[in-house]
Amino acid sequence: MLHTVKSFDRIGEENAFAVLARATELQRQGRDVINLGIGQPDFRTPDHIVEAAIKALRDGHHGYTPATGILPLREAVAADLHKRLGVEVDPELVLIVPGGKVTMFMAILMFGEPGAEILYPDPGFPIYRSMIEFTGATPVPVPIREANGFAFSAEETLSLITPRTRLLIVNSPANPTGGVTPKAEIDKLVEGLRRHPDVAIMSDEIYGQMTYDGLAHQTLLAYPDIRDRLILLDGWSKTYAMTGWRMGFSVWPKRLYENARKLAVNSYSCVNASAQFAGLAALTGPQDAVRDMVAEFDRRRKVVTEGLNALPNVSAAVPKGAFYAFPNISKTGWKAKRLASALLEQAGVATIGGPDFGVHGEGYIRLSYANSTENIRKALARMGEFLATAKPD
């Protein structure tokens, strides 16, 4: 009998991929399924980015690169952060990684161990908790409440810090809620963190360019007081419709960067060479496609919010960022995961049950509006018909 280490008994997964697999299987069976479950743009990667990767291959970029990423790309990341957010970043502290999850993995691995506590948003991206539990650390959920506009509360977050807290994970704009935490609340959090100098922070800002209603993204890189313990998570997947390219970047404090570099060497050696040239073209080339995509998401956001609020016993806060809606379905009488399953199997609409994002997710489901307006309207009509006729289990 094979004996794996006990930590693998604690590792979870991202149920959006299980829903995607089931939706794909139903489609193979001839079912008409509208997928509002998976969180990826329905746009093609812009042509100039694709061409840059092809050119890199034709130019012979077939070998290893530095584990940290090619220098021109790290310099382009630093320049882009300065241009967009007004922050100074040393390219020597930028790490190019194969997707945003790698930054989570590294950060949580550095601080997670039995006896330690790591705070994470709940509802939030499910891999946060999965990786915390994998390391043996205690996951401490920071409630993300609809009553607070799905922003985190600085006061509540700070109240959860104990002498065992090693890492705080924050995410704005947020998955799965679409919430954006106001600058005033972030100011309060950073002010309070001065009393906890031994707590590191990982700020997941992967949706930073997707904000609406005139809101500006507030990066934690803008706070000098915490830069020596701040890890930034960002990347190309959402902004440039490059989910399958597996391209992310992180910015590390100087004292942690070497640890991150060693983890890169030990796990994946380096990021695909031609993909890095694609990432370079994305940052240094025209940004029209990004603006057009976000404008289209904004239009869909209004359609999905209006449609959800017209459904029986459903209410939906207006998302302020990302491309997710997180409607409250508690008055329907359905448990969230059971409703999500029934919508897929019976109505042909793929969504994700709120509990897949944490213990505070019950009573909600997540819809991605990274799908066409036509499909969104069709899905909402199916949901309305289902809720009007189906009885909760």
Image (cartoon, rainbow, N blue to C red):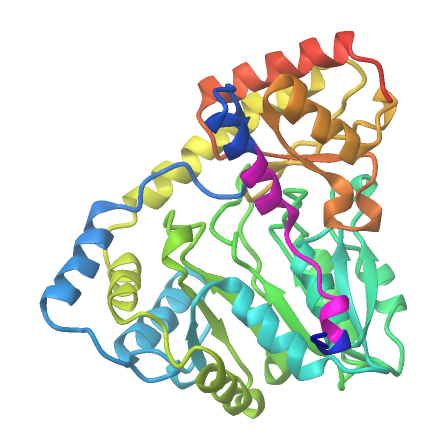
Residue 283 vs 329, above or below: the answer is: below
**Residue furthest front as drawn:** 1
Residue 256 vs 25, above or below: the answer is: below
Q: Residue at x 37, y 64 (%)?
A: 83
Specify whether 55 is left or right of 17: left
Q: Which quadrant is the N terminus positioned in? A: bottom right
Specify whether 38 is left or right of 237: right
Q: Is residue 105 magenta?
A: no
Q: Position of residue 237 (x, y in %)?
A: 43, 54
Q: Position of residue 41 (x, y in %)?
A: 44, 41
In terms of secondary structure, what is the magenta stretch mainly? helix
Q: Residue 381: which quarter of the image?
A: top right
Any part of residue 316 in sight = no
Q: Residue 6: which quarter of the image?
A: bottom right
Q: Position of residue 289 (x, y in %)?
A: 30, 42
Q: Residue at x 40, y 57 (%)?
A: 236
Residue 387 vs 21, above or below: the answer is: above
Count of numbered marks: 0
Q: Residue at x 26, y 76 (%)?
A: 72
Any part of residue 360 in sight = yes
Specify whether 70 is left or right of 184: left
Q: Residue at x 53, y 89 (%)?
A: 254
Q: Residue 213: which quarter of the image?
A: top right
Specify whether 166 is left or right of 180: right
Q: Position of residue 328 (x, y in %)?
A: 78, 30
Region rendered in magenta: 7-22
Question: Looking at the image, which is closer to me, 117 or 244?
Answer: 244
Residue 329 vs 150, above or below: the answer is: above
